[in-house]
Image (cartoon, rainbow, N blue to C red):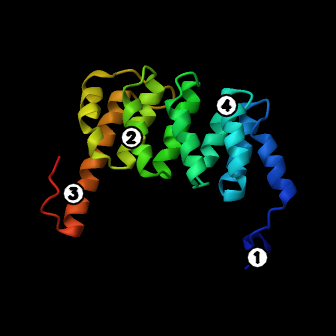
Amino acid sequence: MGTRDIPKKVTEGELYRALLGLNARTQTAAFEAAKFLYDKAAPELEAHLIHILKNGRRPFNRAAAAYVMQMVTTKKTFAALERTVGDEAESPRVRGEAAEALAHSHRRKSHDVLLRNLNDKSKDVRFWCAFALGQMAERRAVPILLRLADSDKRPVRGFHSVSQEARDAIRNIEIENKEHRRKHGCVFCKPL
């Protein structure tokens, strides 16, 4: 094993600089800091990340904090992300990043928050709520997702349309439902 294969221990100073970097003046610097913190996230960062999510200078700073928060799985981070998804005064970009973070790490209440915001006025919020609910295999979302799949052709910059994301989410929910029935032999679980 060469020296490159040995993980380098991260110092408190490096973590502190990365946390400060989340509030950088440029989007590139903020997300570089977020990528650095992503693999090093720990519950000790909870309060700092929540603070930046609520008080970051610019929307991209708050979005970078939400990105890292998917790796800090505490009740407080889940609650902060859920509040952000539902905060109509917040930038749709930040709300979408919070919804995406909940797709990867969440609690039961997160499903309800995402379901409520699946009809949001922002296409970005609808897109990321559809994505998250598909990842969660949330069957209760299917009726709304079907409507979005039929009617919401608005594209989200850098991705595809809300309609396509809704179809992808439905497909994922169907696959997960079939897998669950196959694995557990559930006769009570109905197909979609």
Residue 82 point in image, percent of width and height:
51, 39
The answer to which of marks 1 and 4 sits earlier in the sequence is: 1
Q: Amino acid at mark 1?
A: Gly
Disc 3 packing (10 Å; few <14; some 14–19; many ≥20): some
**Quarter of the view holding residue 49:** top right
Disc 4 packing (10 Å; few <14; some 14–19; many ≥20): many
Look at the numbered discs 1 and 3 and tell me whether their residues touch, using CB distance below 8 Å: no
Q: Amino acid at mark 2?
A: Asp
Gap between marks 1 and 3, in whole Å?
Answer: 45 Å
Gap between marks 3 and 2, in whole Å?
Answer: 23 Å
Gap between marks 4 and 3, in whole Å?
Answer: 38 Å
Q: Amino acid at mark 3?
A: Lys
The answer to which of marks 3 and 2 sits earlier in the sequence is: 2
The answer to which of marks 2 and 1 sits earlier in the sequence is: 1
Q: Which mark is residue 60?
A: 4
Disc 1 packing (10 Å; few <14; some 14–19; many ≥20): few
Residue under numbered circle 3: 178
Query: Closer to the camera: disc 1 or disc 4?
Result: 4
> Is 13 displayed left or right of 82 in the figure?
right
The answer to which of marks 4 and 3 sits earlier in the sequence is: 4
Kind of element beneath mark 4: helix
Query: Closer to the camera: disc 1 or disc 3?
Result: 3
In front of the other: 36 or 78: 78
In front of the other: 55 or 94: 55
Residue under numbered circle 2: 112
Residue drawn at (28%, 55%) of the image: 176
Q: Which mark is residue 2?
A: 1
Determine the residue located farthest toward the right in the rendered image. 13
